[in-house]
Image (tube, rainbow, N blue to C red):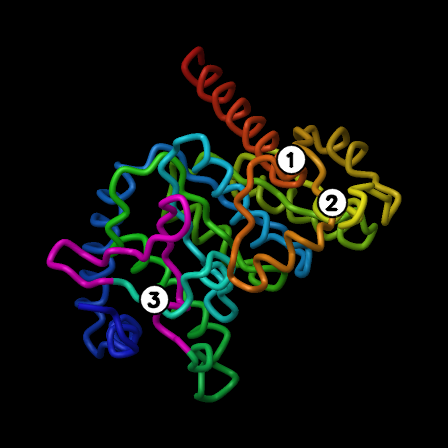
Amino acid sequence: MAATTKDLKSILSKLTHSDGAKVVEQIGEQTKQLQARMVGIRRKLAILSGKGGVGKSMTTVNLALAFARQDQQVAILDVDLNGPCVPHMLGIRGQQLTMTPEGALPPVGPLGIKVGSMDFFLGDLSPVRWNRPMDLSPVWLGTLEMTVIREFLADIVWGEVDYLLIDLPPGAAADKPPVIASFIPDLDGAVVVTTPSEMAMDVVRKSVIYARSLNIKILGLIENMSEYRCPECGTESELFESQADEMCDALEIPFLGRIPFDRDLARSFDKGKPLLDPAHPTIAKYAEISGRIRDVLDFNKLLAEKL
């Protein structure tokens, strides 16, 4: 049975139950179920920026595809509840979660990537919005979103997964990193995405400091749209004067690599037909970066074992 907007309303209605004790009990049950679901997931990574428009979701999707090409079982949780775009990029928009007695089975995209997203509930409907007095909306909207995220993590049957990539919303959603950190205490860390723009880097620098204050490990930084790749000759030309290396040195985080603005890549994902050719130069860069992320994770694991 496919998930519908009725299922979404059921999720949200749990938070408005008149009996506070029952709400607490439900949250406790969800938390236990969430922890049980997470046992089957080997590595859990958040992809964040703090700055909108830097291509974070594009980065998330391409890293997922890169890991999948390495024979890894991969899943994506699209936490951008008001503007989910991962299903569109992977060409699986319009699909729905399948409800079973064991939980919700997520749609599967290219290379076997499992996806959990609000987009599967909404279809062509508008995002979920608070339609009550605005003086209460920040509290309730944040709580409603937290409930939905908990439901996704707890109710979706992720199965055995090597990598779960959590695509966090941009900028203003500063409440999402602590929510994810509280739901997944064994989060392996975060990959930060920026562009070479000085304004973007200033915001991203603050996001790194904020994430660290929440005890979220920073696995490294990816500089997206660092250059422009000519679709005819393949030449890559500088768009901005990059200071990513200097920022990474100052923050003492690994610099994972640069991704050029690639018209072919952008068009393919915009049309929901992801570019999968491993020989494509930009796709090869994602493969290199995914390898560096694996190296950082392996090093952190070795260091933790020695400590």
**Residue 259 picture quarter:** top right
Q: Is residue 116 magenta?
A: yes
Q: Which label was assigned to residue 260? A: 2
Q: Looking at the image, which residue is at 34% across and 64% down?
A: 147
Residue beneath the point at 81% across and 51% down: 197
Q: Amino acid type of disc 1?
A: Lys
Crowding around mark 1 (Cα neighbors within 10 Å: few <14, some 14 to 19, many 20+) is: many
Q: What residue span does the magenta drawing correspond to?
A: 98-123
**Residue 24 at x, y = what percent?**
23, 62
Q: Amino acid at mark 3?
A: Gln
Whole-angstrom CA distance, mark 3 to mark 1, is 30 Å
Q: Quadrant of residue 128?
A: bottom left
**Badge number at residue 95:** 3
Identified by mark 2, the residue type is Pro
Q: Is residue 182 left or right of residue 262?
A: left
First-in-chain label (3 vs 1): 3
